Image (cartoon, helix red, strand yellow):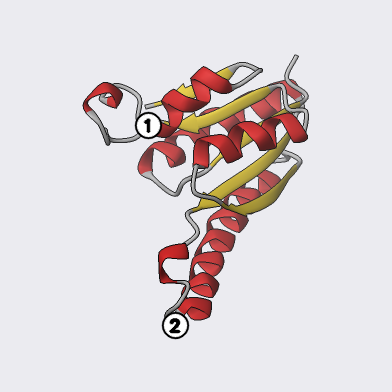
Amino acid sequence: MFRRILFAHNATPAAERALIYLEHVARLEKAEVIVLHVYESPDRYLATAGYDSLVAQLEAVAQEVVNDAVEHLQSVGVSAFGVIEAGISPARVIVETAQDEDVSLIVLGTRGPSKLTDILLGNVSTEVLRSARCPVFLVP
């Protein structure tokens, strides 16, 4: 049923909890997993001398997050690879990546509220639920 799964990993405790569920589903379904980490591009610092260094640091952290998850999944027999993207809207990047990669399930953790209307799920997970064209599995 789920042949390709997109795991949107934002390096939060909820994402770490979601990884446990993802591992189980991927093993049962014999699915390939795409681990995606989206970091916000620091464009407001574009004119500063340290901009390139800041971007390099963000990319290094993002790569570490993705590598850790991919290595864990592969160690338990799940086929997985990682993708890192920069973007202002993580939800949009998640949904677009899911469409581009033709995934059949998106897995992500929910996190603390950023607005009153997002108290239960979180801003990114709410937007992914609204926009995704495939099932979304949210883990609190």
Along the horizontal axis of the image, is 78 left or right of 135?
right
The location of residue 39, given as percent across then percent down, is 50, 54
Going from the N terminus, do you reach mark 1 or mark 2 first? 2
Front residue of 90/30: it is 90
Q: Secondary structure at mark 1?
A: helix
Task: Bin the neighbour count of mark 1 within 10 Å (Cα to Cα): few under 14, some 14-19, many 20 and up.
Answer: many
Q: Residue at x 34, y 35 (%)?
A: 111
The location of residue 6, given as percent across then percent down, is 65, 34
Image quarter in which the N terminus is found: top right
Q: CA distance from mark 1 to mark 2?
A: 30 Å
Image position of 81 with respect to 17: above or below: below
Image position of 119 with respect to 91: above or below: above
The location of residue 109, given as percent across then percent down, is 44, 32
Tell me the residue that label 1 is attached to.
123
Tell me the residue that label 2 is attached to.
50
Q: Amino acid at mark 2?
A: Gly
Front residue of 72/52: it is 52
Q: Residue at x 52, y 43 (%)?
A: 9
The location of residue 47, given as percent across then percent down, is 45, 77
Q: Residue at x 54, y 49 (%)?
A: 38
